Amino acid sequence: MRIAAADGQIQTAAKGDKLFPGQKVITGRQSRAVLRFRDGSILTLGPDGEFAVKQFAFSPQKSGLKKDMKVLSGAFRYISGFAVKRKDVTLRTPVASMGVRGSVVEGVVSENVPNFVNVPQGSAQMSVDGASVNVKGGQSSIGVAGRRPTPPTAVPTEVRAQAIQFIQKELGEDLPPLPELTAEEMKEDAEANRQALALQLTEQPDATGGAPVQPLSPTDDFVPAPTPGQMSRLLDHLERVAQLAGQLFDRVVAQAWAFPLISEAQAAGQEEVLEAVNLLTEAAQLGLLSLPEGATLTGEQRQFLAQAAAAFPQAAAVIQTHVARQLNVSTQTVTTSARQVTAATARNAANQTEVAQVVANAIQAVQTVAATTPTQFTNVIVTTAVQETNAPDATKAAAQISAVAAKADPTIAATAAVSAVNALPAGQQAAAAARIGATTATSAPERAAEVAAAVARQQPTEAAKIGAAITQVATQKKPTTAEQAKAAADVAVAVAQTNPAQAASIGAAIAKIATQATAAKATQEGGDSAAAQAKAAADVAAAVAQGNPTQAAKVAAAVTKATGTANATAVAAAVSTQAGVAQAAKVAAAVAKVAPTQASQIAATVAQSAGEGVNAGAIAAATAQASGAPVADVAAAVAQASNTTAEAVQQQAAQAQTEVTEAVQEAGAAEADANAAEADVNAAATEAETTQAEAATDANEAEQAVDELPVQQNQDQNQDQNEDQQDTFPDPVTPTPDNASAS
């Protein structure tokens, strides 16, 4: 493989060489080239190929890409890289131009063969002499000078399949292993990416470090004829070969046949292409590629199609398999480019705003990329940004990166938070989980419950702290006490489902935060703070108990212990309603155990709330035994609530000794658990206040970077439009020969 410069100098290329403006890549008969651009996109060029870059500018911070390339000959495949919102990617051939709007575009360019273009993934607009067609993923088109491109639906399946097989032969299906970027290469990329798009297009030096090279039009001859010095070096080489072989060498004769020999070699390559895609050339000769819509086929055309179908029965399968394979390759390229561009930015960022802008823009842009899902992409980009950050406070950086991702696309908030936590060193993850979760929820409050559950699932021992911290920020975002209570209940049930064994302590910690928040809101608005607290405590306890009915008694006791005995009746009623008849006596006994002065009221309320078929006697007896309250007083209260007599209640109790005994034992265990968890619950609540303050600061700083994006994009876009649009070559791309012995 060779690189030809605009001044005629030709050099043999090696892996890692850079392609500068004004240069062209030329592959030999037995070589191919893989070019990796700064945005992570890949262009593969097959044997006997010629390729040049006309323009290239890329800014992940401004989410912009401009690229103008030309394939003069050979099989090629272009695979998109880093996701951006604004892109202008043009791929030209001597006959056609394509506006690339998607993942993978490939084709064949050869003299005397119609230009074949295939789009396995994404889309492209193919134009020839001003006429255009849209080519969607899984479709192809063909370009011939002077004619409108063939509509994708008019390209025969067998013609497509044969051309695709030729591309597969020339390029392979998979990318060869590409070397990782070095630290120095990443630094160079980051510095180049930091420049405005318009600046990249107008002020980049050429390979010699001089002034920007002059623009080249799409019809320019990118490589001039060899200079006398180059011809002399060629003849010197031939003379040495002749001497080694013991043969005489005549320079005059050699100069006469040197170029004809090269021309014959090129002609041989063209003949191979003609033979490999003979269906394409025959279809063009028969006029099948330029039929007017609705035209009737001639007998010769029908015969050709029938023969092609008979000779190539596997054509549809070839296309289908190829499309699926290229989706995998495209996914790999998008993932790799996301990792490399993000790593280069994070390692070399002047501040966290740069990283935030890259992450936020990419998260928004990837929604239109078919080769990956937002969840997969988010995991890659957030993980890389956190792992590669140069920020002094890794936890704060992780929280901010997760927050900007969630702000950019709230639907991936949970993925962003989990990725940020897991990207930290193992020893830091548990301590950072609550802060990262809370910061993320601050930026995406409507996803607070999802974030809480996802982070708690990864850090189960920190579930109560995570739930409390996220409840703290979630309730701050709500305008009424009722909405605050619901937000807290949503977080509680989501977190408790991830760790049922800790349901009681999780519910207690979250309920404590919820009652504090609702009390403050009610006081601020002149409402009944006691009623607001009772509702919040009851809503949280009921939500957790509904998802964990066998833990209902422990949940009710823990929430009552954490939020205050003033809420005991409300909690007992709400939990027994959700847990049902089977748990009624246990719930009443457990709550009365931690709020003994309200035993009668608790028992009466539960008897009313538990539902039809409840054993009022068992509730009365269990509550009295657990709390130490007089049985007669409790029975009387239950009887009044149940519209029966105290004697009837006591008779029921005598017949339900087993149920009463189990309820009393459960109450004792619930009280013990509540007491044991009290310190942790209080610590979680206290830590939640600190975390909320940190999260607010982290999220505010992160969101400023996101909020600036539309303004910066418009400014940059206007700057691009106001420039003279000089077609300079701003930055190098890296060609990587697939064959080290390429000619």
Image (tube, rainbow, N blue to C red):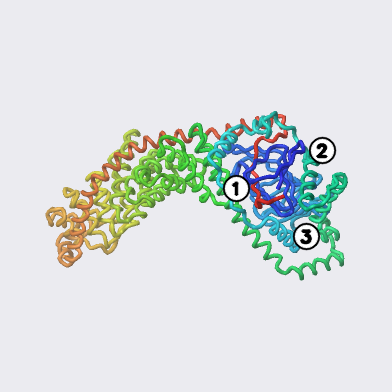
Residue under circle 1? Answer: 368
* Labels 3 & 2 near each other (Cβ < 8 A): no
Asked whether 156 or 676 is in front, the reply is 156
| Snapshot quadrant of residue 294 | bottom right
Classify 295 as above or below 9.
Answer: below
Residue under circle 2? Answer: 228
Residue 283, disc = none
The amino acid type of the residue labelled 1 equals Thr
Asked whether 704 or 319 is in front, the reply is 319
Image coordinates for residue 732, horizontal then vertical, percent = 65, 38
| Snapshot quadrant of residue 273 | bottom right
Position of residue 221 in the picture relative to residue 591 (left or right): right
* Labels 3 & 1 near each other (Cβ < 8 A): no
Q: Can residue 373 be seen here? A: yes
The amino acid type of the residue labelled 2 equals Pro
**Mark 1 nearby-residue class (10 Å; few <14, some 14–19, many ≥20):** some
Image coordinates for residue 667, horizontal then vertical, percent = 20, 56
Residue 277, disc = 3
| Snapshot quadrant of residue 151 | bottom right
Q: Can residue 518 be seen here? A: no
**Which is nearer the N-term, disc 2 or disc 1?**
2
Position of residue 103 in the picture relative to residue 432 (left or right): right
Task: Name the residue rendered at 72%, 53% in the picture.
Answer: 47
